[in-house]
Image (cartoon, grey):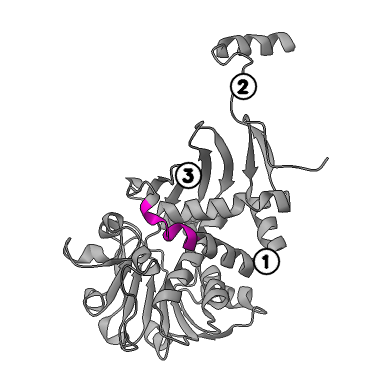
Amino acid sequence: MTKKVANDLNLVPFVSVDNMMKIVLEIGIEEVLIGIANYLEVDFKRWELFDKTPRVASHSNEGVIELMPTSDGQVYGFKYVNGHPKNTKDGLQTVTAFGVLSDVETGYPVMLSEMTILTALRTAATSAMAAKYLMPKKSKMMAMIGNGAQSEFQALAFKAICGIDELRLYDIDGEATDRCMKNLTGFGINMVKCSSEQIAVEGADIITTVTADKQCATILTDNMVGSGVHINAIGGDCPGKTELHRDILLRSEIFVEYPPQTRIEGEIQQLDDDYPVTELWQVMTGKAEGRTNEKQITLFDSVGFAIEDFSALRYIRDQLEKTKQFQNLDMVADPDEPRDLFGMVLRAKEAK
């Protein structure tokens, strides 16, 4: 029997990890990245319609667990996500996640999905979408500092969306770089393994920092960054975790997703609370300028925001009818008489 996206309100389409991988492979990873980026553009350009709040975070010495909610007035979405850098030492993922879309009119969920893979995809798509507006013209070379779980997605998003075809890679763990290069073989990217951050960034048009350690680190010092580059800083995503020296920020035009969240979690937590930054949606809608000259340093201080997850979930939901990659879950109680929930439980016993 052919699967269809659930029409019964009590049946909720569930996209498992296996389903997500099959969707990505069937459509093609670069096409998925482009598709998510297109949905992101639509939602960023209607940014003012959304409910917006900084993510609800529960911090511990080991990591953080967060909820990221938003709504456009018709659909509500949230993501559950953790960040535990120590997990890699135990053979576990640093980040795991799942997400839900719901109908605002009824409050009923309409899709449940894994978001560990989807978060990596939407993060990469967001990075490349922002770079399209902020990077130097005709950018071809990107340096990537940190070659862990996010790195291949970032590389392919920048190739598919921004035309990057040269990649200079550095990680303190050389095996991570080797694995990244092996995974990207055959995707049409020229790659160079570098022995230091300094060597990696030489000649790069774009610098992506995507490290995992939960600390205020200095992955890039001021003397490493010349004029005319775009910095895609995505590793800093919680209080007390940064990657860039403060002086780099002071030389850059800084672009963010949602300032109240970024000032707590991003690179700009190093700056005064009133330090001027520009929201990316304003650039995309023409309400603010992006890059204004080729010598300028632009910095996308990205920490991830709920609207990006909302966009990614919308994209996946719209692929379900075509790919049939989901299972229907009986998640919502559906008594014949809505006020007789207890009676439904009793009748289940009789049915046995």
Residue range highlighted in magenta: 40-48
Q: Nearer the viewer, residue 170 or 282?
A: 282
Whether residue 275 is in magenta: the answer is: no
Residue type of the residue flagged with mark 2: Asp
Look at the numbered disc 1 and give the secondary structure of its residue: loop
* Label 2 Cα crowd, 10 Å radius (few <14 / some 14-19 / many 20+): some
Mark 1 closeness class: few <14, some 14–19, many ≥20 residues within 10 Å: few
Please identify the quadrant where the N terminus is shown.
top right
**Relative side of 131 to 149, left or right:** left
Whether tag 3 and tag 2 are in contact, CB under 8 A, the answer is: no
Which element type, helix, strand or loop, lies under badge 3? strand
Q: In the drawing, what numbered circle is on residue 334? A: 2
Q: Which residue is label 1 attached to?
A: 28
Residue 147 placement (x, y as % from top left): 49, 72
Q: Which mark is residue 77?
A: 3
x and y, in percent, of residue 319 in the image: 66, 53
Residue that appears at 40% across and 58% down: 304
Residue 102 horizontal/vertical position (percent):
52, 39
In the picture as drawn, the residue positioned furthest to the front comes out as: 286
Q: Is residue 320 above or below residue 178?
A: above
In the image, residue 107 sits, relative to residue 180, either above or below, namely above
Where disc 2 sits, the SS reads loop
